[in-house]
Image (cartoon, grey):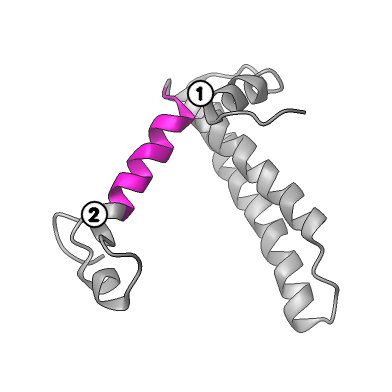
Amino acid sequence: MSDILANEYQTLAARTANDFELESILVNCALGLTGESGEFSDLIKKWKFHGHELGQTKLLKEVGDILWYAARVCTALEVDLSTVMRANIEKLEKRYPNGFNSADSLARVDVKDGPE
């Protein structure tokens, strides 16, 4: 498969989604994101503490599932995935204008009310 862009991925992912009302979609996605993140975390736990091999293929499968749910949320909220991605990068550029450092992480200048 050729490389696909975020909005194309979002469109293709939407083809495999159930057609629920907004509330059900958001609840399903919240639970799905939690579940898939848990599966990703479990792979890391087993590698770090149980002596399992770190399986890149399995990790990336879980990342793909996480992306599917993120794309589904964007579709349900009628926003392009690329818009959310761009907003996140803009936030991070404000927070870390010269790249990551602990002082900027503590200051969190992008948050109006200060550190969370």
| Residue to which mark 2 is pinned | 94
Q: Which residue type does callout 2 highlight?
A: Lys
Judging depth in this view, the residue of 48 and 101 nearest the camera is: 101
| Residue to which mark 1 is pinned | 75
Residue 14 point in image, percent of width and height: 63, 21
| Callout 1: SS | helix
Task: Provide the residue span drawn in magenta.
Answer: 79-92
Residue 112 point in image, percent of width and height: 14, 54
Q: Locate the C terminus and report the quarter of the image it occupies.
A: bottom left
Disc 1 from disc 2: Cα separation: 27 Å
Q: Nearer the viewer, mark 1 or mark 2?
A: 2
Q: Residues within 10 Å of mark 1 (few under 14, many from 20)?
A: some
Q: Residue at x 63, y 35 (%)?
A: 68
To which quarter of the image does residue 102 belong? Answer: bottom left
Above or below, comparing residue 74 to residue 19 in the picture: below
Q: Which residue type does callout 1 highlight?
A: Thr
The kind of secondary structure the magenta stretch mainly shows is helix
Q: Residue at x 77, y 28 (%)?
A: 1
Q: Residue at x 53, y 24 (%)?
A: 7
Above or below, comparing residue 11 to residue 69 in the picture: above
Residue 85 point in image, percent of width and height: 43, 39
| Callout 2: SS | helix
Above or below, comparing residue 35 to residue 44 in the picture: above
